[in-house]
């Protein structure tokens, strides 16, 4: 018997585009990011079905090969994907392969790419507190002679800092793989991209306390400008340990 060939991306797109139950095809991951495609990059494809539609394509649910990963969802499920959740950034920067909803798929993706004002304010306040907590622990551990703990806390603080800065700009934080790609194309307002990436690299690797404090000075100013003074003031005199000397 002849060997069945693996399903390719282009063959599946042709098959799905011919099925009226399919209202959208959305490509995410490296294939949706210019200059990020490598020989190892597969095609991560969302297949969006009209709610209640019957289709034989459901036989491909969970399909996963080195060439093609498929996520088959209803339109209602697609609207909810990543809202909130880890998938939000992937969909925020996804590419539309097919949109049968007169721009409806594009509008759904645009919603995922932009936090609403209330969501952004709430999230940035929470990330600010988490950032301050890890920064404080790092500086205190360095002071008290616990260098490993200080470096680990410093690395944690960078994760929370990035969440904070993107939330302040009402954007989902990119995955680490796409951080430099994102900032090169869509810089954070008020921040020098090169400085921020260099600081993140050095602090994560060494726990550099003076640099952590200088960076916090900039973050504090930005956070207060965004209305988060109460979050910072709740730290009381402990802020003195975090601020530049």
Image (cartoon, grey):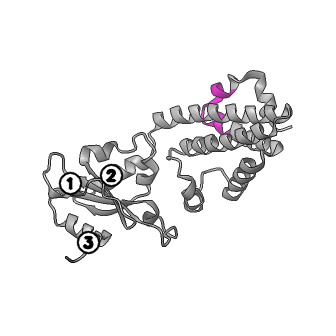
- In the image, what residue occupies the spot 50% across and 38% down? 120
Q: Farthest residue in the bottom direction?
A: 2
In-image side of 203 versus 52 (left or right)? right
Question: Dot 3 corresponds to which residue?
Answer: 11
Vertical comparison of 152 with 8: above or below: above
In-image side of 132 versus 12 (left or right)? right
x, y percentage for residue 200? 70, 50
Contact? badges 3 and 1 (CB < 8 Å): no
First in sequence: mark 3 or mark 1?
3
First in sequence: mark 3 or mark 2?
3
x, y percentage for residue 241? 81, 31
Q: Is residue 227 magenta?
A: yes
Vertical comparison of 63 with 224: above or below: below
Question: Dot 2 corresponds to which residue?
Answer: 107
Q: Label 3's element?
A: helix
Question: Dot 1 corresponds to which residue?
Answer: 58
In-image side of 120 versus 110 (left or right)? right
Residue range (magenta): 222-232
Q: Label 2's element?
A: helix
Crowding near the residue tagged with mark 2, few <14, some 14–19, many ≥20 C-alpha atoms within 10 Å: few
- In the image, what residue occupies the spot 69% across and 34% down? 134
């Amino acid at each position: 018997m002849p060997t069945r060939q693996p399903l390719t991306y282009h063959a599946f797109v042709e098959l799905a585009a011919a099925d009226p139950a399919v209202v959208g095809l959305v490509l995410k991951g490296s294939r949706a990011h210019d200059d990020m495609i490598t020989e190892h990059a597969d095609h991560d494809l969302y297949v969006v079905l009209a709610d209640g539609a019957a289709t034989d394509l459901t036989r491909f649910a969970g399909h996963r090969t080195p060439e093609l990963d498929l996520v088959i969802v209803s339109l209602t499920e697609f609207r909810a994907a990543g809202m909130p959740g880890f998938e939000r950034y992937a969909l925020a920067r996804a590419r539309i392969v097919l949109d049968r909803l007169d721009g409806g798929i594009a509008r759904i993706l645009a919603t995922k790419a932009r936090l609403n004002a209330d969501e952004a304010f709430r999230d940035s306040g929470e990330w600010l507190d988490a950032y301050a907590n890890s920064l404080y622990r790092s500086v205190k551990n360095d002071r008290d002679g616990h260098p490993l703990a200080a470096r680990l806390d410093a690395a944690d603080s960078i994760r929370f800092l990035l969440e904070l800065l993107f939330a302040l700009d009402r954007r989902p934080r990119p995955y680490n793989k796409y951080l430099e790609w994102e900032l090169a194309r869509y810089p954070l307002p008020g921040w020098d991209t090169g400085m921020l990436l260099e600081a993140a690299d050095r602090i994560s690797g060494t726990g550099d306390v003076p640099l952590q404090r200088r960076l916090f000075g900039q973050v504090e100013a930005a956070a207060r400008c965004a209305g988060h003074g109460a979050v910072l003031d709740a730290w009381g005199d402990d802020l003195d340990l975090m601020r530049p000397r």
